[in-house]
Image: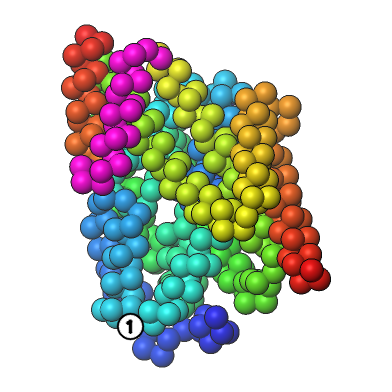
């Protein structure tokens, strides 16, 4: 694994995403194709990212640590801090062309594609973990609990851990 | 938004006090993006008056079309407004330092125990739950797009559906790299929106 390339892949994924988890599909396909990561660290990092403070999107720092230790975590941190700087340029463009339909259209098309690719990645992670009745049940229950908006994510993850220990012991 | 909106406010705070404010936001923002956004609003509009409520709304709209994490883009805009480049650096650092440190610490702890048999079976339960929770995240990403399309009528709904479907097929078979798919999708979106708007003006 070449670290400069890894950093550039982190950076590219962040530049091509809007929002914290938008970089997931791009990074996922890039690193799986190169054989630099399996589904497992992605799933682990997403879980850790859900229980840590701060903006959603810091999962990638956890992911960086899991595949490359402290250098990986630091590279990921720098890579997510750079693309948002371009907002200063965008603010200027927005004043001049903000109402141009091509601008909103571009973001709309990009977001739709991210939705499609994201769905594929989620199914892939589920399959990599071993797709059985227990897994489907836990996924559905977690979605149901999250939908209520009353139960903190960390409690849902705790319940799932208990379910995992009971089912897969 | 006017040009003055990006010029520094008259009573610029010192970089050290800026760092303290944003470090506090980073430290308190357990519970995800909405909480962090509220804390940023509270600090920069209500408590310190760096910008007005309307400006904050403007900034948030711009932050949403910037690449990467929207909350970081919002932080960059406010940091620039308050104290230019130094403000950007200090605000980003303050916001990220606590949360990045906690994220790394948790991951280090996890990496120590992940080999244990009990952790492995717990994880087999946790991963599907993470997928379930992420499915909700996916829906939050898709919902505003769906609402826009529905407002625009059936043609827009069909086109959006085709777009998502095409992205699914392209990401499964990957005849072209994913980032090419994303950029193509953006260009198709830009073109159709533009043509649509021209048609609407003429029609």
Report x, y in % for residue B51: 39, 81
In the rendered view, how is the structure colored? rainbow
Tell me: residue B141, above or below residue B128: below
Residue shown at 29%/24% (left/top)? A138
Mark 1 Cα shell of 10 Å, populated few (<14), some (14-19), many (≥20): some
For label 1, the residue is B49
Task: Please state if B38 lies on the left or on the right of A94 as rendered.
Answer: left
Figure quadrant of residue B138: top left
What residue lies at 65% left-to-right and 28% top-to-bottom? B169
| Residue shown at the point (62%, 41%) measured from the top left | B161
Residue B119 coordinates in the image, percent (x, y): 24, 19
Whether residue A79 is visible, yes or no, is no
Please identify the residue farthest to the right as the structure is shown: B202
Question: Considering depth in this image, is A72 or B21 the residue closer to the camera?
Answer: B21
Residue B1 in sight from this viewpoint: yes
Quarter occupied by the N terminus of chain A: top right
**Could you say which quadrant of the image residue B25 lies in?**
bottom left
Q: Position of residue B151 (x, y in %)?
A: 56, 58
User: Which residue ends up furthest to the top in the rendered image?
Assistant: A169
Residue under the image location 40 percent in, 13 percent down: A130
| Magenta region, residue range | A131-152
């Amino acid at each position: 694994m070449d670290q400069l390339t890894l950093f550039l892949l982190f950076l590219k994924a962040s530049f091509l995403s809007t929002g914290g988890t938008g970089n997931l599909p791009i990074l996922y396909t890039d690193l799986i194709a190169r054989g630099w990561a399996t589904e497992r660290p992605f799933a682990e990092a997403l879980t850790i990212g859900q229980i840590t403070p701060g903006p959603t999107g810091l999962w990638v720092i956890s992911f960086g640590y899991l595949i490359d230790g402290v250098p990986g975590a630091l590279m990921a941190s720098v890579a997510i801090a750079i693309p948002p700087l371009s907002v200063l340029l965008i603010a200027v463009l927005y004043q001049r062309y903000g109402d141009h339909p091509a601008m909103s259209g571009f973001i709309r098309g990009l977001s739709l594609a991210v939705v499609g690719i994201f769905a594929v990645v989620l199914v892939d992670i589920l399959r990599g973990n071993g797709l059985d009745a227990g897994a489907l049940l836990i996924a559905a229950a977690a979605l149901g609990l999250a939908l209520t908006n009353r139960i903190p994510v960390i409690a849902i993850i705790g319940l799932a851990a208990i379910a995992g220990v009971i089912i897969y012991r | 938004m006017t040009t003055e909106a990006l010029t520094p406010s008259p009573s610029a705070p010192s970089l050290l006090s800026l760092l303290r404010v944003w470090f506090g936001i980073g430290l308190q923002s357990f519970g995800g993006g909405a909480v962090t956004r509220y804390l940023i609003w509270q600090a920069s509009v209500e408590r310190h008056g760096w910008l007005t409520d309307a400006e904050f709304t403007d900034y948030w709209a711009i932050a949403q079309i910037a690449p990467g994490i929207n909350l970081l883009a919002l932080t960059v805009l406010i940091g620039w407004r308050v104290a230019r480049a130094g403000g950007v650096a200090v605000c980003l650092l303050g916001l990220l330092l606590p949360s990045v440190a906690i994220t790394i610490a948790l991951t280090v702890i996890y990496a120590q125990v992940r080999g244990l048999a009990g952790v492995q079976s717990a994880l087999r339960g946790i991963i599907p739950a993470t997928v379930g929770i992420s499915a909700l995240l996916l829906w939050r990403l898709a919902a505003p797009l769906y609402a826009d399309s529905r407002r625009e009528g059936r043609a827009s709904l069909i086109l959006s559906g085709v777009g998502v479907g095409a992205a699914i097929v392209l990401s499964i078979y990957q005849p072209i790299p994913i980032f090419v798919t994303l950029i193509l999708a953006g260009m198709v979106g830009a073109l159709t929106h533009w043509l649509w708007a021209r048609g609407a003006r003429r029609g």
